Image (cartoon, rainbow, N blue to C red):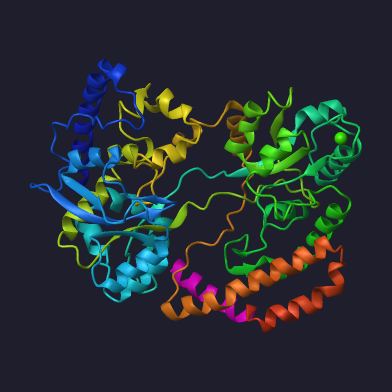
Amino acid sequence: MRKSRRRLWLSGWSGVLLLNFLLVGCESGNQHSANGPTATVDPPVSESFIVSEKPLTLSIFYFLQNNVFNDNWPVFKQAAEWTNITLHGTIPQSATNADQLFHLMMTSGSIDDIVETTKDNFSKYGSQGEFVPLDTLIDQYAPHYKAFLEQNPDVRRNATSADGHMYFIPFVSDGELSTGWFIRQDWLDKLNLDVPTNVQQFHDVLTAFRDGDPNGNGKQDEIPYFMQGKEYGIYYLLGLFDVGCRDFCLSTDGSQVVFGAMDDAYAAAIQKISDWYNEGLIDPEIFTRGSEGPTYLFGNDLAGSTHDWFGSASSFNDTMQSKVPGFSLLPIAPPASESGRVIEWDYRNRNKDFGWGISAQNAYPEETMKYFDFWFTDEGRRLSNFGVEGQHYTMVDGKPTFTDEILRTGTVNVTLRNLGAQLGIGFQQDFEYEKQWTNAIGLKGLELYTANNYVKYHVKLPILPYTIEEEAEVKKLKGAIEDYRDEQAKKWILRNEKVADHWEEYSAALKRMGIDELLEIMNRAYNRYKS
Ligand code: CA
């Protein structure tokens, strides 16, 4: 019964949207303003998305990525027209500290109707009765989200707290690939080299970049490999030596939580990376190279290869031409590792540990849940991904397509956030949104990695359902252990020390710091997650 009603509901909607598209299409000439006054699409004829007969205004606590909820966001104005629910943000636009404000609100005794925060906070305050358990509300009032959970059991597991309840609807990201290998094709051409396909060839190419003066200035100033990721950029090289994880990860068979940085394979791989570093194949400033690194190094024709985001890395082919004529930074397959495996270990963990939930003080939990469900309809999802039809995108061949005005802003994700789209609320991202501002080279890279299935293992930890006691214990132990791992690795690399000489001492220190106890807690929570 419910299913057939839903289908009717949606088919009614497609017709309405088509009509809207035609209407808006006629007057689109004077409506394309990314930040201008709001001109929402005419309210639909169907009342299917109306969640309350009388208009309701609910307060919301939202502050994420330097972005405070703004009552004028066109995306939420459109949603208000369709649902009859208006959200009112309570944080001043001038606010600077989200954590502080959240805790201030929680201790003030006055909590907003809708709150955006992390799973930790939902679990903690949910178990104290400050947030409503959503399980029954979802069953009764959120058919679209319920169906989504049925099709995506991982999302349900990730959103469930240790007490068995869901207190929030998470942001669900889309698009598996994040970063990949890139090399300067123009440098390879100058030195008459082939694209490296395994770790030995990669080493030889980096050595040729170091010695062959590919930037042609007569100085040995080339940086063969760099990455902008400060504390972690160098560790993308671990995969070349068959180490997929130096963190708390799942074993490749998914059976348990392990700590990659205590394996002998890790010791051997760090030794190799240290060797490469001390041969001058790796950026001497790799541990401090921040996000301005690529622009500086590529702009001065100094860097030969990196491992970075497909979208941003490929964009340098557009932006560097005027500074470095012939600049060509192309995606390549991951060089085969020492054992011959071609694997990309990095990928996006689609389950995020944040989203929105309902405070116990909210007088309209039923309406709020229906409103949450709206964002899981096709129309709600499109609104949250692409903005308002006719203003920010138009339908082209059945696909939402950003207007030139939106695309011209360059940082489309930031532009959209300032319109109320692509927020950290409970909705399912659509990777199509990102593809539209990735250039042809980046898309080719994505295709190469997708077609060849280079992401073979999913070892990133899910959001584990800790009890409050476990959470405190994990917080106490984990940071110190990770810091120690980082310090030691850095020391071995920068000081050219033999890892084997220190490995026993390092392993003993990890035990003293409680690595066994920590893994036991994590595995307990992981078993809870799996059941
Ligand atoms: Ca040079």
How many numbered circles does the render carry?
0
Camera-side residue of 340 and 322: 322
Q: Is residue 227 magenta?
A: no
What x and y, as percent, mark residue 348? Answer: 54, 49
Ligand 1 rendered quadrant: top right
Q: Residue furthest front?
A: 94
What x and y, as percent, mark residue 108? Answer: 27, 72
Residue 513 versus residue 320 in the image, above or below: below
Q: Quadrant of residue 8?
A: top left
The residue depicted at 61 percent of the width and 53 percent of the height is 457
Camera-side residue of 319 and 152: 319
The residue depicted at 57 percent of the width and 36 percent of the height is 311
Q: Is residue 517 magenta?
A: yes
Residue 387 versus residue 153 in the image, above or below: above
Q: Can residue 314 be seen here?
A: yes
Q: Can residue 268 be seen here?
A: no
Per the picture, the main secondary structure of the magenta-coloured stretch is: helix
Q: Quadrant of residue 515?
A: bottom right
What x and y, as percent, mark residue 408? Answer: 47, 27
Q: Residue furthest bottom?
A: 512
Residue numbers of the magenta segment: 516-531
Residue 498 versus residue 45 in the image, above or below: below
Camera-side residue of 229 and 159: 229
What x and y, as percent, mark residue 481? Answer: 64, 73
The residue depicted at 36 percent of the width and 41 percent of the height is 421
Quadrant holding the C terminus: bottom left
- Lateral position of residue 457 relative to residue 94, left or right: right
- Lateral position of residue 149 relative to residue 409, left or right: left
